[in-house]
Every structure is written in structure tokens, then in C-alpha cells.
Image (cartoon, helix red, strand yellow):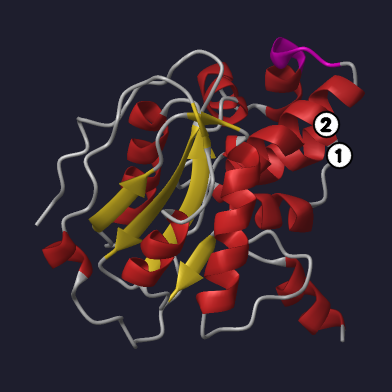
Amino acid sequence: MKLNIRSLPKGVPGGGYAYILAFDNGAAKVGMSTNPASRVPVHVYNARQFGAELTDYWVSPPHQGFEATEQALIDIARALSPEPVPDGARREWFTNVDFALLVGSAEQLSLNVISGPAIVPVPEERRARPARTIQVHPPRRFGSPFADLIRKSRHEAGLTQDMVVALSGVAKSTLVRWEGGRAERPEPEHVRALCVALEISPVKAAIALGFLTAEDVAAVHA
């Protein structure tokens, strides 16, 4: 059953939200946003590209210091995860984490709450199902790291978007989408052309898009 996420808040001045999303493939996503109503659907859309549907969610009240809250949730999820997470890794996707335990821990955090839209808590009957035990890879997060990479590389090279379009042959509409964090299922030849134009390592681009991890690259060269 698909959840209705239309009730998610659009944000309040001076604060933000932390959230936890659970998917039917056993993956859980921890995140933060000043506007969950626009951010959460992005994760839901990306997950659907890998056949996963949102099954549960928890969103905090609006509060100050929501960045620190997200990090606290990442630390809690890391502790609950049966799979080891490298020290220093800021992983936001987890597999086989007990959603009920994670939400319960989240609700014990001390938050500097400000006035704003409240979220209806996840019903107990939805939390009561047993934890998943299957091993899965979480949906990959497309967009933001790649957007940061190409935008930074373009600025460092002193190029306008029109210049990059002329050098790479990539359509300007595509470049604008990618720099805006919307790079779902990018065409490999377009990514390759952009890497050449901006002198970006294809490996860095693959990591930014989520196709590889730094650990994958290290294992190849080990």
C-alpha cells in the first residue's frame, strides 16, 4: 500500500525537520530538510526506480538545530544496523534497521521545537511488524553530489552553462537539470562528454552519481 505523503509540512521560518523513511525492500533513509513536502517525494521517486515503495515515515516537529538532529539519527541508525559502517562515513541509507526502534530513539531526542505544522505520529500497528532480515542494497541517491561536482567544476573553470553546452554537446536543459540535482538515470555518453568538457574524473562522477563508492575503488586498487 502506498502512503499518502501530501500532509508533509512545507516548512517554517527559522527551523527545519529531521525525518526517517522506511521502504518495503528493508531500506531506511535518514535525512533533514527545511521543506519535507518537497524533499521526501524525491526520495520516494528515486526508490521507485529500484522497485521500492515507502511503507513508513517519521518526521520531527520543526526545530532549530535540525542538522545536528540528523547526525544524531545517523549515529543511532549506525548503532542499530547489523551491517558495519566505516568510521567517519556519513551514510544516510541503512538496511535491516528496526524502524520502530529507530523512531522510538528519535522521539527521545531533546529538540528545540519552534511553532509550526505537526506531523501525525506513525500508528503503533504500523510500527509493530517484525524487522526485515533480507539483505538488500538501498536505493541509490542520485542528484545532489553530482550536481555539486559539476557546478563546482564549471565555476572553477570559469565557464558559463552555455560554454559547457558548446564544449560537451550536452543539451542546456539537461545541464540545468543536473546542476539542479535532478540526474535520474543519466545517459552514460552525456556524463562522459560532460566529464571531458569539465576535466572531471569519470570515477569521481560515478561515485557522485551513486554507481560506485570510494570503497569499491579502493578494493579495485588493493
The x and y percentages for residue 34 are: 50, 26
Instruction: State whether residue 185 is above or below residue 99.
Output: above
Relative horizontal placement of residue 129, taking residue 28 as reference (left or right)? left
Q: Residue at x 57, y 31 (%)?
A: 178
Q: Is residue 49 visible?
A: no
Q: Residue at x 38, y 63 (%)?
A: 104
Q: Is residue 84 magenta?
A: no
The x and y percentages for residue 188 are: 57, 50
As rendered, which of 180 and 89 lies closer to the eye?
A: 89
Q: Quadrant of residue 26?
A: bottom left
Return the residue at label 1: 199
Q: Are the residues flagged by discs 2 and 1 in contact, CB closer than 8 Å?
A: yes
Badge 2 density bin: few <14, some 14–19, many ≥20, Cα 10 Å:
some
Which element is circle 2 on?
Answer: helix
Which element is circle 1 on?
Answer: loop
CA gap, disc 2 to disc 1? 8 Å
- Select label 2 or label 1 by which is in front: 2
Check the image and name the residue furthest to the right: 157
Q: Quadrant of residue 5?
A: top left
Return the residue at label 2: 153
Q: Amino acid at mark 2?
A: Ser
Q: Which residues are magenta?
A: 159-163
Q: Amino acid at mark 1?
A: Glu
As rendered, which of 121 and 95 lies closer to the eye?
A: 121
Q: Quadrant of the N terminus?
A: bottom left
